[in-house]
Amino acid sequence: MDRLIVFGGTTEGRELCQKCLEQLNNVVIHVFVATEQGKEVLPKDGKLVVHTGRLTSMEMADIIGTLSPDMVVDATHPYATEVTENIVKACALSNAKYVRLLREKADIKKGFIAEDPLKVVKLVNRSRGNVLLTTGSKDLPAYTGIYNFKERVYARILPDTNNINWAINMGYAKDHIIAEEGPFSYERNVEEIKKYNIKYLITKESGKAGGFDEKQRACKDANCVLIVIPRPEEDGYSATEVWEMVQEEYTKKTIHIIGVGMGNPKNMTVEAVEAVEDCQVLIGANRLVDAVNKGRKDIYYEYKAEKIKEFIDTTDYQHYGIIFSGDVCLFSGATVLLDLLDGYKVKVIQGISSVAYLASRIGVPWAGCRVVSAHGRNVDIVREVAENEGIFVLTGGNVKQICQTLTENGLGMVKICAGEKLSYPREKITAGYVKDFVSKEFDPITVLYMCNENYGISTEFGLSDDMFFRGEIPMTKSEVRSVILSKMQLRNSDIVYDIGSGTGSVTVECGRLAPKGMVYSVECNEDAFELTGKNIEHFELKNVRQILGRGKEVVADLPKPDSVFIGGSKGELEDVMEQIINKGVNIRFVVSAITLETLTNTLMFMKTKGFKNTEVVQVSVSKGNFVGNSTMMTAQNPIFIVSGDWEE
């Protein structure tokens, strides 16, 4: 059920509640009033929950957070400024939608205006005559300043024992206390003015709902002076406008994104169960919908986000329930759907994730563990397992493939637990070593936990040349590659270009250093392109895209990079760099040059365009060769490495 919170037992608040009960379905109204008297005048209905008592802003925030209403309407008295301040603060703390319902202003035709009780006191002390206070009990202390107040002042207050005793303790005469509850008619006001020989009637600008018109007419006809305390200025909406806002909020389509855990209804949260009950139609995969439906709801079997959106757009249900397994914020299809549902009222109800469930079943505190998904996603599983002591893996039925890859890369002795059909009667948890799982069969719905006691984050670069397939294509040697990579200053999620990939040694190293980014490896020589592909496959990199072609012909279609390495450009260096800098700013460039001409062209381009932090380094490497019992140093060609930043 949707929830609406209304603060205030005022006439406007009561009328709003009555309209909601009569015209809105599936809405529970929580009304907050200060006194039992306020509670008694409210409608009696099962969908109206009344809360009595005064609250602090923090208490309000806690309640609003617990109830999670779609809207909070402040229908409190215009002069209850402190209460309004608390409601505004509470809504801000709990991120709730706040709407102020303003009472219609009074039409003051004749009388005096006094901004506050102290000015009222000064006004009535100028002459003699009895005074009728109709401003409530809160300001009674201020009116004790009226000359001879015990004899002159009559206080009309609510028939509450505490209020009456409080007034008596302040010195008000017991027979001058009119303990009555409104509304007060014109006739009743005239009667009291005459009965107590009232010369001054003090009232707040309470508007039509507060009986102001009846007081004003009574004063005029009974020859009594009306003194009005004007209401504070504030922003808000009329009763009609608020009702229109409530109607719009509570009659538009509501989409419930419901996480139901692993699939067994026993693992659903109470909130998820209630959400399913409130929905008119359930949407999702057969297994999940059938598990929670029990034949009572309309159903639409679908898990593709675009088709779900189309169904919602073209049908007339008010409450839709879209069922997802596990935690809807953890590698869930709900993420894509949420983007598509912009403009609808969407409520997200969390479920228990299979990761948390498996962790509890095997007694592992998962707060410090890495969580990755290999279900329809590219993940460098070797790197992830190698660099983390504890890791959970959401699989897509590819457990054997994952374990095979890990075993081939020296991680076969990592401890592993596999949870199959978690939460179901046929739940199965198997423990062992990764290498033992290569020959086993597993259910498609399987979650893995691995504990790598020998984990460690690898910052290695400058891999040995012997680790690469080389062929006849010249390779950027390990030592030179190390300098290039240090100049590239790669980050975890960078977009990288390697233009002129050659054997792919720089491509591979970039892919390893930016595992959450993407490397675009460009090569126009078919043999070199094929060799790069072999090395990418050898290192099992999922974040590299190969492109066959010349640099200036292909970079136009690529996304803006964070870092660019140009190792070969077929004499088109300036054209390639020009296209790249046109994509945007904050791009790091590193260029390797063997010839002085390439070096000169690079430096001139960077200087002309205004690159920052330009630097040129010459690297001369000699490697030792063993000749008998001696070591002979063999010099390699010197390399110029130019780096610079294209910035704003």
Image: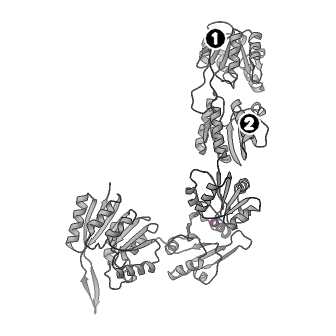
Please determine whether, in this image, residue 140 is positioned above or below residue 72.
Answer: above
Please determine whether, in this image, residue 142 is positioned above or below residue 502.
Answer: above
Residue 114, given in percent of the width and then of the height, sits at 59, 17
Please determine whether, in this image, residue 532 is positioned above or below residue 58.
Answer: below
Q: Residues within 10 Å of mark 2 (few under 14, many from 20)?
A: some
SS label for mark 2: helix
SS label for mark 1: helix
Instruction: First in sequence, mark 1 or 2: give its number.
Output: 2
Residue labelled with disc 2: 18
Residue 497 placement, left or right of 598: right
Please determine whether, in this image, residue 74 is positioned above or below residue 630.
Answer: above
Q: Is residue 538 visible?
A: yes
Q: What residue is shown at x 67% (from left), y 73% (from top)?
A: 420
Specify the farthest residue to the top.
Answer: 127
Q: Does the CB distance between marks 1 and 2 fall below 8 Å?
A: no
Residue 18, given in percent of the width and then of the height, sits at 74, 36
Of 553 and 558, nearer the camera is 553
Residue 50 badge: none
Q: How many marks?
A: 2
Residue 173, given in percent of the width and then of the height, sits at 75, 15
Quarter of the rendering containing residue 441? bottom right
Of 631 and 591, nearer the camera is 591
Residue type of the residue flagged with mark 2? Gln
Q: What residue is shown at x 32% (from left), y 67% (from top)?
A: 487
Residue 80 placement, left or right of 599: right
Residue type of the residue flagged with mark 1? Val
- The C terminus lies in quadrant: bottom left
Q: Is residue 5 magenta?
A: no
Residue 454 placement, left or right of 34: left
Residue labelled with disc 1: 124
Magenta region? 342-355
